[in-house]
Every structure is written in C-alpha cells, then in structure tokens.
Image (cartoon, rainbow, N blue to C red):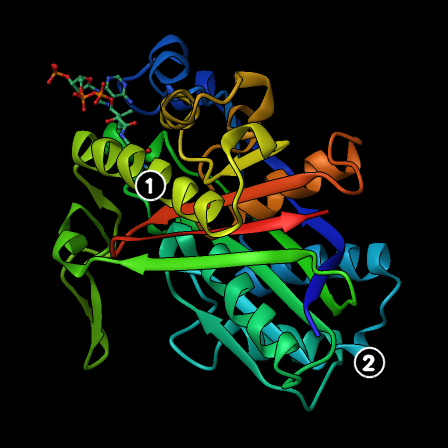
Amino acid sequence: MPSRIAGTGRYLPAQVLTNAELSRRVNTSDAWIRERTGIGQRHIAGPGEQTSDLALAAAREALAAASVTAAEIDLIVVATTSPDMVFPSTACIVQDKLGAHGGPAFDVQAVCSGFVYALAVADRMVADGLARNALVVGAEIYSRILDWNDRGTCVLFGDGAGAVVLVPSAKPGILSSHLHADGRYRNILCVPGQVQSGAVTGTPYVQMDGPGVFKFAVRVLAESALEALAANGMTAADVDWLIPHQANVRIMDATARRLGLAHERVVSTVDLHANTSAASIPLALDVAVRDGRIQPGQHVLLLGVGGGFTWGSVLLRW
Ligand code: ACO
C-alpha cells in the first residue's frame, strides 16, 4: 500500500542568535548576510541538548498531529549529519527516548538531502509492508561543527529538527521519489575530520566552496524538479508548493525562476531558521502545514541537495 504523511512536527532550540549578535563576533553585518543569503537569525542548541533531544521533541509533535502513539511506530529513520555520537545511531537513541522499542531504527547520512533520502526509504518500506507506521526525522546541531571564527560558513547554519509520521494509505500521498549522488563533488562541502585512536584528526568544522556549492545546487535542484514532474506527467504549473532545501533564498529563487514557478509558491523559512541541513525541509513543511498554506489535495514538491554531493526529490499529494 502507498504511504502518506499523517502528521508533522518541529522543534527549534530556545536560544536565538541574530545576525547583529554574530556581527559582534566575526567581521560581518546583518546587511551582508541578508542580502547574500536571506538569513536573519538562527537557533542554537543549549549545552545540555543533543540531536536526539531535538528529534524527540519534533517527533512528539508529529505523533500528536498524526494521532499515532509511540507504541504504534515500527520504523524510525533519522536523517542527520550531526549525530549524538559515532554510534549507536541517533535513531536508536530516539527510539529509546520515545519508548517505541522493537522495530528497525537507523540513521541516513546524506547531509542536507538527508530528509528526502530518509523519506524515500521509509516510504518504500511502508509500501513494501516492512513497516506500518514510520517516524521520519531530520535533526541537526550544526553549531557544534562550525568554526565560529570563519565568517564564510558560521553565518549560514542553525540547529533544529522536523519530523513526519508516515502511514499506509489507499490513496497515495507520496507519488514519487528520485535520489542521486555524485561523489566527485565530495570536497566542495565537507567536514573532513575523523576520530582516530582517541583524537580528532583533520578539520572537524564545515569547509565549503561557496560559489561552487551555489552553482551545483541551482543546477541539480532544477533538474531534480523536472525529473519528478516528468515521472508524474506533470508540469511546474501543477506544483502548489515547492519546498527546496533551505540553504539560502538566492538558491531557492534561482531554482523557482528556472522552473517558471512564482516566488509565492516557494515555502521559505531560511530567514528565521538559517540552513538546518537535514532538518530544513521538514521544518519548512511543518510551518506551511500548520499555518494552513498546504491544503488537502495539493501537490508539494520537496527538493533536497547537500554534501556528497547528494540531491533528490519527493513529490507528495497532500
Ligand atoms: N560577511 C561579510 N563578508 C563575507 C562573509 C560574511 N559572512 N563571508 C564572505 N564574505 C566576503 C568574502 O570574504 C569575499 O570578500 P573578498 O571579495 O574581499 O574576498 C566576499 O564576501 C565575496 O565572497 P564570495 O564567497 O564570492 O561571496 P558570494 O557572493 O559567493 O556569497 C555565499 C557567499 C553566501 C556563501 C554564496 O556563495 C552561497 O550562497 N553559496 C552557497 C553556499 C550555501 O548555501 N551553503 C550552504 C550549505 S550547501 C547546502 O546546504 C546544499
């Protein structure tokens, strides 16, 4: 049976860091950050908060919205690049904190495409009968893998989590998913550090070729959208809401322009959340569901792109 999203949820840590506050730490300005990225502020996890805590809070909201109990969840997939620890997976930690023991739980590591990857995998598992009710979460604490002295990267990211509950449905909610990767581009966005013999070797902070990432992201987001539309016999005119990875508004606007999609059809939360990597799409989805923009029967196109490089789409009928 196909699957559909029955509920969404989100969690953002209490501490907000504005551009103005950041400009007192590094040589930047609110005007530069807004003009180049559209970002106005980001949330920062507290010292006692782990990625699994953010995921758990978002998951609880999604479960309540779906009217599904934790005991009914038999699959947990967490998309994250900033897990609690090397292992076990953050998904297993979330499973224990939720008290939803027994079903499979695993992390998906596809950086900012992680949620689209996780949703695609969970959808197939529900469709194939391997699971009935799946919890899919994107959760990140990037503030701990940023070099706060590097203005080229520290202004771009934030912490947060978004979650959805997938259930089987006679009418398909998820119409298609398409996933891609090209490891030749792995060095333009990476955290190349390793834990080795009790010490961190290499750089444990985000390294990025900004213009390289920008060009790559705009190209593959547009290609990905066209691939999803062609597979469903649709055109951009059939898309009610485009929810691309929330890296920055210029990437999102350029993608919408390439597709001929009106700016108003793009859900953007980057001004308030910054780039929360795997959490950015489910966060934006939850915002647009809860504020009533996304209505039953509408088509929602999720587009992910991120380190690896990875990219892909999930097309939904709400
Ligand atoms: N504040 C002020 N000045 C800055 C800052 C900053 N925070 N960061 C860089 N600059 C300076 C640079 O040092 C450079 O100065 P110079 O000309 O004296 O050398 C100048 O601004 C221009 O730098 P560019 O990197 O060419 O600036 P650009 O217009 O390309 O904007 C940006 C940089 C915003 C990073 C852009 O390349 C971009 O959006 N790239 C995509 C990156 C992205 O979104 N990454 C997120 C992760 S990727 C993902 O999620 C898929």
Three-letter amino acid code at the position of disc 2: Ala
| Residue 35 image point, x, y percent | 37, 11
Please say whether residue 121 is visible from this viewpoint.
Answer: yes
Report helix, strand or loop for mark 1.
helix
Work out whether mark 1 precedes mark 2 in sequence or the reverse, and give the earlier one.
Answer: 2
Q: Which of 207/307 is in front?
A: 307
Q: Residues within 10 Å of mark 1 (few under 14, many from 20)?
A: some
Please say whether residue 267 is visible from this viewpoint.
Answer: no
Looking at the image, residue 265 lies above or below residue 112: above
Would residue 293 be found to the left or right of residue 116 on screen? right
Tell which residue pokes out farthest to the right in this image.
Answer: 67
Label drawn at residue 223: 1
Label drawn at residue 15: none
Which residue does the image show at 60% across and 56% down from the upper left?
Answer: 175
The residue at which mark 2 appears reads as 71
Would residue 245 be found to the left or right of residue 124 on screen? left
| Residue 26 image point, x, y percent | 29, 23
Q: Quadrant of ligand 1?
A: top left
Does the closest atom of ligand 1 sit within 8 Å of the Cβ of label 1? no
Q: Quote the CA–CA distance across marks 1 and 2.
A: 40 Å
Which residue does the image show at 41% across and 12% down from the upper left?
Answer: 30
Would residue 77 be found to the left or right of residue 85 on screen? right
Three-letter amino acid code at the position of disc 1: Glu
Query: Which of the 4 image quadrants contains residue 172?
Result: bottom right
Q: Residues within 10 Å of mark 2 (few under 14, many from 20)?
A: few
| Residue 259 image point, x, y percent | 42, 27
